[in-house]
Image: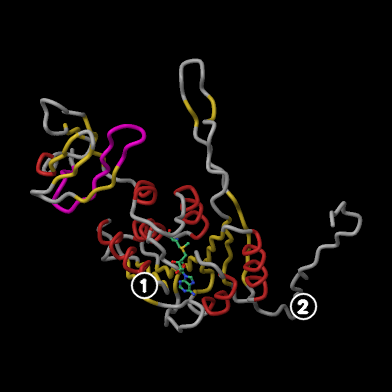
Amino acid sequence: MNVEKIKENDLIFLILDNRRKWLLQVKSGDSFHTHKGIIEFDDIIGKSFGTCVFSKPYETLGYKFYVLKPLPSDYVVHMSRKTQIIYPEDAGLILMYTGIGPGSIVVEAGCGSGALTCILGNYVRPHGHVFSYDINEKSLKRAKKNVLRANLNDVITIQYGDILENNLEHDNVDSVVLDMAQPWKAIKKIKNYLKFSGTIASFSPTIEQVKKTTFALIKNDFFEIDSYELFKRKLQVRENATRPEIRMIGHTGYMTFGRKIKNLKNPYREKKHEVPKEFVDLNGMPLRE
Ligand SMILES: C[S@@+](CC[C@H](N)C(=O)[O-])C[C@H]1O[C@@H](n2cnc3c(N)ncnc32)[C@H](O)[C@@H]1O
C-alpha cells in the first residue's frame, strides 16, 4: 500500500475540533501557536496524512490535533481571502456543467483571492492550465500566494488583465469562467477565446447580473444557456434528534452556463433570431406607490 508521507512545504488541514480548523504549510523548524498549545511541524513531517499530533507543552496542555490532507473544499473555506469566494458546492456545479477536467485549458476572470482558481487548477492537472486574470493588484498578490501554498503554480498562471478591455490573446480554450461585477460586458470578447462547443460559466450574486448575462449570451449566439442556484443544507445527526441544522447560508450566488456554437443558417427553415425584450407587463399587479 502506498502511504503518502507529509513533506516540507506540504499543505495540511489541522483540526482541533468542529470549529477550529486551519490550512497550514509545513516548514521544518517552524511551529504553529494556538491557545491550546504549540504544534511543532517537525513532529508532523515524515508522518502519514490522517495522523494525530499533541500540543506542547505536553504536561500542561497536550491537546490532540488531527492532521488531514486538504480537500479542494478545505482550500476554499480556509484560505486567505478578502473578496467574496465561491463555495465548494457552487464550484462543484461549475466543474460538472463546464466539463473542466484533466487537460482542460481555462481562462478565468477575476481571480479574487484565488479560491475558485485553486479548485480549477486542482482539476485540470496534470496537463491542463488555468490562466487567471484580475485588475486589482491586491487580489493578484493574494491569489498568487494562495496558488503557491496549494502547490498549483505549475498549472495556474495569475496575471494582470482586464477581461473587458484587454485582448488576452487566447484561442481555442475549453472554458471561460467569470466571477466579476459585469460579466455580460465580457461575453463578446471571450467568445473569441473559446473553441466551438467550449463552455462558459458565470457566477453572480444578483438576479440583475444573471438577466444581463443571459441576454448577452443569447445575443452572441451561445447555446444551452441555463442559470441555477444551489442550496446546501447540513444535517445535524444526533440520537433521536437528526434534522437539518438551524442556521444555513441562505444565498451564495447564481451560476449561468452557455456553450459556443457555430450557428449556421438553415437554408431550409431559418427563423428570425429574436432577443427577448427586457419588459415585464405589470398591469393588474398590486403595486404600492
Ligand atoms: C468576487 S471576486 C472573485 C472571487 C474569486 N472567484 C474567488 O473564488 O476568490 C471578483 C474579482 O473580479 C475582479 N474584476 C472585476 N472586473 C474585472 C475585469 N474587468 N477583469 C478582470 N478582473 C476583474 C475584481 O478585481 C475582483 O477581484
- Amino acid residing under circle 1: Glu
Is 11 covered by the magenta stretch? yes
Q: Which residue is mark 2?
A: 268
- Amino acid residing under circle 2: Tyr
Whether residue 74 is situated above or below residue 209 in the rendered picture: above
Q: Which residues are magenta?
A: 4-21
Q: From this viewpoint, which residue is outermost toward the front? A: 289
Residue at 55% across, 75% down:
186
Residue at 34% across, 70% down:
158
Magenta segment's dominant SS is loop
Is 54 covered by the magenta stretch? no
Position of residue 146 in the picture relative to residue 195 (left or right) = left
Position of residue 197 in the picture relative to residue 83 (left or right) = right
Q: Which residue is mark 1?
A: 137
Q: Looking at the picture, how far across and down is residue 288, in whole percent?
A: 84, 54
Picture quarter with the N terminus: top left
Q: In the rendered image, which quarter is residue 284 located in?
A: bottom right
Estimate how packed mark 2 is, as few (under 14), some (14 to 19) or many (20 or more) residues with alpha carbons within 10 Å.
few
Q: In the rendered image, which quarter is residue 37 located in?
A: top left
Of residue 252 and residue 186, the one placed in the foreground of this image is 252
How many numbered circles are shown? 2
Q: From this viewpoint, which residue is outermost toward the right? A: 284
Q: Looking at the picture, how far across and down is residue 29, in whole percent?
A: 8, 48
